[in-house]
Image: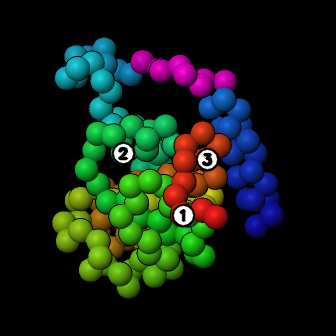
């Protein structure tokens, strides 16, 4: 368990350094070169697929989620307990370990995009795996959670 935490901490540190070194730089994407409308990248090409039992979910970086919040319609769900703030635009707070008991709050369409986050990542990853196991096909998870979001210079709401 300590090894996993250390590995996660190292990954987050490297991610933070990478984000800091790329601040203000926009990487080209294959879609902007292939003529998507307005030359802007399609968010469907963002993220990394994470295989889990029953399918997969998409792990997304803070910058990718920031783009999604501007252009895409989806449900944004905070799964962290106890409450420590929200990313602006959050629709619901559902504890990660109660996600399966709150399906009525989520879209009935199991193909609807749902983006999850927590404070640092493990709670929302567990919730994402649960949703995939329940047949949801368009589940996304913010890598590094609210900590990575803040480290990318992005705001939180409801934080004292």
| Residue 69: numbered disc | 2
Q: Earlier in the sequence, mark 3 or mark 2?
A: 2
Give the numbered dot on residue 158: 1
State the SS at label 1: loop
**Farthest front residue in view:** 160
The reply to whether callout 1 and callout 2 are in contact (CB within 8 Å) is no
Q: Position of residue 40 (x, y in %)?
A: 30, 24
Query: In the picture, residue 156 is in which quadrant?
Result: bottom right
Does 33 appear in magenta? no
Q: Of the residues tagged 1 and 3, which is closer to the observer?
A: 1
Q: Secondary structure at mark 3?
A: helix
**Nearest-to-viewer mark from 1 and 2:** 1
Q: Residue at x 42, y 50 (%)?
A: 58
Of pointers 1 and 3, the one earlier in the residue sequence = 3
Q: Quadrant of the C terminus?
A: bottom right
Start-end of magenta stretch: 21-28
Neighbour tally class for label 2: few under 14, some 14-19, many 20 plus, Cα within 10 Å: some
The CA span between labels 1 and 3 is: 13 Å
Q: What's the coloring here?
A: rainbow
Dominant secondary structure of the residues highlighted in magenta in the image: loop
Image quadrant holding the N terminus, namely: bottom right
Q: Which residue is mark 3?
A: 150
Q: Is residue 112 above or below residue 152?
A: below
> In the rendering, at what x and y percent does residue 81 appear?
58, 75
């Amino acid at each position: 368990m300590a090894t996993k935490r250390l590995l996660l901490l190292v990954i987050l540190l490297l991610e933070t350094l990478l984000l800091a070194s790329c601040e203000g730089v926009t990487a080209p994407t294959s879609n902007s070169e292939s003529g998507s409308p307005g030359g802007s990248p399609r968010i469907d090409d963002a993220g990394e697929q994470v295989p889990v039992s029953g399918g997969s979910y998409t792990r997304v970086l803070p910058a990718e989620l920031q783009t999604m919040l501007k252009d895409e319609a989806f449900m944004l769900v905070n799964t962290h307990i106890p409450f420590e703030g929200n990313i602006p635009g959050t629709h619901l707070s559902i504890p990660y370990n109660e996600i399966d008991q709150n399906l009525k709050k989520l879209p009935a369409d199991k193909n609807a995009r749902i983006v999850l986050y927590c404070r640092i990542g493990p709670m929302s990853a567990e919730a994402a795996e649960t949703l995939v196991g329940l047949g949801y096909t368009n589940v996304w998870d913010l890598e590094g959670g609210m900590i990575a979001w803040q480290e990318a210079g992005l705001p939180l709401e409801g934080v004292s």
